[in-house]
Amino acid sequence: MENEKYVYQRNIKVIENFYNSDYYRDLKEKSLIKAIINAIYIDPDNRDEHVYKDLSERLKLKHKDGKFELYNNVGIKLSADAVCGWKQLYDLRKGSKEWLHDYEEMRTCTAAYLVWPRHNKPTINTLRYSIFRDRVDYTLFDISKFFGCKKIFDGNKNQEQFEDNVKDNCKLNEAYLNKLGTYNWLMTFNGFEDFIEKMCLIRFVNSKYKVLNLEDHSVISEYNSFYSFNETYLKNLKNIIMNNNDSKNKSTF
């Protein structure tokens, strides 16, 4: 990425100016800081055409100039989604300026963006935050469960049984079965391995395409009762994002 082109650079500059301002120093109600940052922040997911151009090249997706969207080979509309939002970083650093350093490290890399179908809710984008606190590893584990259901029912014409199986086994099932786009998009992949390869997510899995837990490097085999966005998770996520060369070599941490 050429840094001067990107919305994230503008965000850093504007927010740094706020932190260095007399207004910030004199602000009595520190609880307002997050709300103020939210008001001056521009979401690159929805406003940065250069991010979309980069993703188009990386993921071999179609992009129209002037548009904040991508299209796959059958015309399904897709949008960018950062692997973690600024609010998680802000909360982790308890509102100190340190979160801007994390933000800059992450947003300089095209690999810091995921791509999901864009349509009315429910979507993977919205549900993965509410259910998994934006944890990429558990989101991918859940997607692998969808493809497990798909594999069982491939060739079986009983759509109702397939959908019931997805509902029983997948936390993000409302998005997966949304016929506005996500369902049709997922069905374009030949399986979880194909999904991982085409979406350039190879470093999140081991050599057997099992999703790795970014906290302890173990293979995820079941859901947790609580999902934590913590220092260890962020450190390992950064390692993947900042060293992602899209090679075929699986991550071993």
Image (cartoon, rainbow, N blue to C red):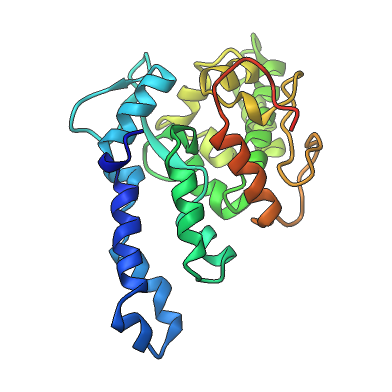
Q: Quadrant of residue 163?
A: top right
Along the viewing direction, whichever of 155 and 181 lies nearer the viewer: 181
Question: Considering only vertical position in the picture, is 127 above or below 34?
Answer: above
Q: Nearer the viewer, residue 160 or 238?
A: 238
Identity of the residue drawn at 33% across and 46% down: 44
> Is residue 146 in view from this perspective?
no
For residue 19, above or below residue 74: below
Looking at this view, name the residue that lies furthest to the left.
66
Instruction: Please report the residue visible at 34 percent of the width from the left and 64 percent of the height from the top.
Output: 15
Residue 147 place in picture, x, y as percent: 65, 23
Where is residue 88 shown, x and y percent of the image? 54, 59
Tell me the residue at 57%/31% (across/down).
243
- Which quarter shows the N terminus? top left
Residue drawn at x 40%, y 76% is 33
x, y percent for residue 245 = 54, 23
Residue 220 visible at all: yes
Comparing 153 with 189, the one in front is 189
Q: Position of residue 246 (x, y in %)?
A: 55, 21
